[in-house]
Image (cartoon, rainbow, N blue to C red):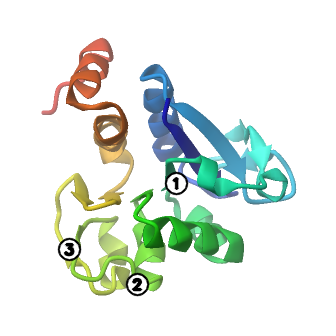
Amino acid sequence: MSRVCVFFADGLEEVEALTVVDLLRRAKVEVTMVSIHEKEEILGAHGIKIQADARMSRIDDYQEFDMVFLPGGGTGTDNLENSGKVKEVVSEFAKKGKKVAAICAAPRILGGLGLLEGRRCTSYPSVTDRLLGGVVTENAVETDGNITTSRGVGTAVDMGLELIRILCGEKRAEEIREEIVYHRM
């Protein structure tokens, strides 16, 4: 079974974070929602309180995970970007060829770490200038090698299905798409 670490920070975009977590769990992927703060209750960008599964300080070995996912949101992304540990884990995953995913404003963190150099990527429109070295598209989701990026709330289902495809295969992603009655307009 695949294991995914999702970093949660105050100010995250709730729909992006929880849609991806929900879809991955439907596909039987083991997801751990990890608070980057010294508390487990996260306050989302729209005032929704979310209970994380664990605190960052209590996880000893991130290498047990197959993927790390960064939800977006303006303040949430700022908080993730200001965490040395988040950047360390993301950089280490990328360096080892492990899977890294980010949505909305969070791909700017990948750009700042130099992880998008020459790669197709996408993000929320206001941060495309921070996808340093990336080949920026307006596609809902982009996967280039071990890096997957997505644009925002409106593409959260696409992102979740793409991560299922990567971790569990095309067939499982299609089963989940049908289960949730998802049809692109």
Question: Counting residues from the N terminus, which is met first, the one under dot 1 or under dot 2?
Answer: 1
**Residue 140: where, in percent of width, then height?**
22, 52
Mark 1 sits on what residue?
A: 68
Disc 2 is placed on an element classified as loop
Q: Residue furthest left?
A: 185
For this rendering, which residue is in front, 157 or 111? 111
Is 167 left, or right, of 38 in this rendering?
A: left
Label for residue 8? none
Please say if 67 is above or below 29: below
Q: Residue at x 42, y 23 (%)?
A: 27
Question: Counting residues from the N terminus, which is met first, the one under dot 1 or under dot 3?
Answer: 1
Identified by mark 3, the residue type is Val
Q: Quarter holding the C terminus? A: top left
How far apart are the alpha carbons under marks 1 and 2?
Answer: 17 Å
Identified by mark 1, the residue type is Val
Disc 3 is placed on an element classified as strand
Is 35 left, or right, of 110 in this rendering?
A: right
Please say if 54 is above or below 84: above
How far apart are the alpha carbons under marks 1 and 3?
Answer: 21 Å
Q: Residue at x 32, y 17 (%)?
A: 180
Q: Are marks 1 and 2 in contact (CB under 8 Å)?
A: no
Which dot, 1 or 3, sits closer to the camera?
A: 1
Disc 1 is placed on an element classified as strand
**Residue 41: where, in percent of width, then height?**
80, 44
Mark 2 sits on what residue?
A: 114
Q: Residue furthest top?
A: 179
Mark 3 sits on what residue?
A: 136
Q: Total number of numbered labels?
A: 3
Please say if 75 is above or below 34: below
Identified by mark 2, the residue type is Gly
Is 93 left, or right, of 182 in this rendering?
A: right
